[in-house]
Image: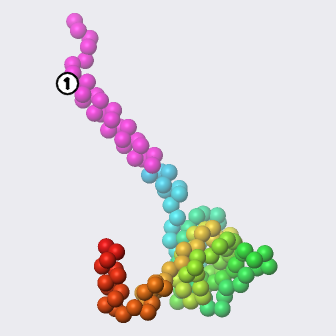
Amino acid sequence: MNTMIKPKHQRLVLIVVALVALIGAGLLAAYALKNQAAYFYLPSELAAKPPEQGRAVRLGGMVEKGSIRTRPDGVTIDFIVRDDKARVPVRFSGITPDLFVEGSGVVAEGRLEGPTFVADNLLAKHDEKYVPREMKNMSTAEAKAVIAETK
């Protein structure tokens, strides 16, 4: 009696083992990403249902006019992110993006510590009227020509 597995059954076993390994790797990756995902909150959502303290989240809204204050260390700033329903105080230490100004949109990545959102990273957003410095004095036709050349 031959105890060897037939080649047809060997292929079937290899396919099953490969599928189990692939599914296991996918589940492991999904579990790891779940713990690293940063959820996005608006100020009103953060005020209504705040995440647990220390959890990595993103806060998006507008920088309130007149709210940017630089601390004596020259590196740390405090400002307010708002929407039409709520305001959230934010603290950030580091170099701010060039587009970060009062009245502009911002996405702050960080965590909630007490009532203050402590940002590790700031992403400044521009509005739909944004025009790069190089194209500010161009007519619409000239701007379209420059864009067409870069494609």
Image position of 66 (left or right of 17): right
Q: Relative to residue 84, is residue 115 depicted above or below?
A: above
Rendered residue at 48%/85% (across/down): 133
Image spot of residue 25 (x, y percent): 41, 43
Location of residue 2 (image quadrant):
top left
Q: Give 26 or 103, whichever is nearer the viewer.
A: 103
Q: Amino acid at mark 1?
A: Lys
- Up-down relation of residue 109 to residue 88 (above or below): above
In x, y percent, where is residue 68?
67, 85
* Colour setting: rainbow
List x then y, in percent, for residue 87. Answer: 61, 85
Coordinates of residue 82 in the picture (x, y in percent): 57, 85
Whether residue 48 is visible, yes or no, is no
Q: Residue furthest right?
A: 72
The quarter of the picture where the C terminus appears is: bottom left
Q: Residues within 10 Å of mark 1 (few under 14, many from 20)?
A: few
Classify residue 136 as left or right of residue 20: right
Closer to us: 59 or 130: 130
The residue segment tinted magenta is 1-29
Task: Give the residue at x 58% y 79%.
Answer: 98
Can see residue 70?
A: yes
Q: Residue at x 50, y 80 (%)?
A: 125
| Residue tagged 1 | 8
* Residue occupying image coordinates x 38% and y 37%: 21
Question: Does the stretch in magenta take in 14?
Answer: yes
Describe residue 15's horizontal placement relative to residue 54 as left or right: left
Magenta stretch, overall SS? helix
Q: Quadrant of residue 144?
A: bottom left
Q: Quadrant of the N terminus?
A: top left
Q: Secondary structure at mark 1?
A: helix
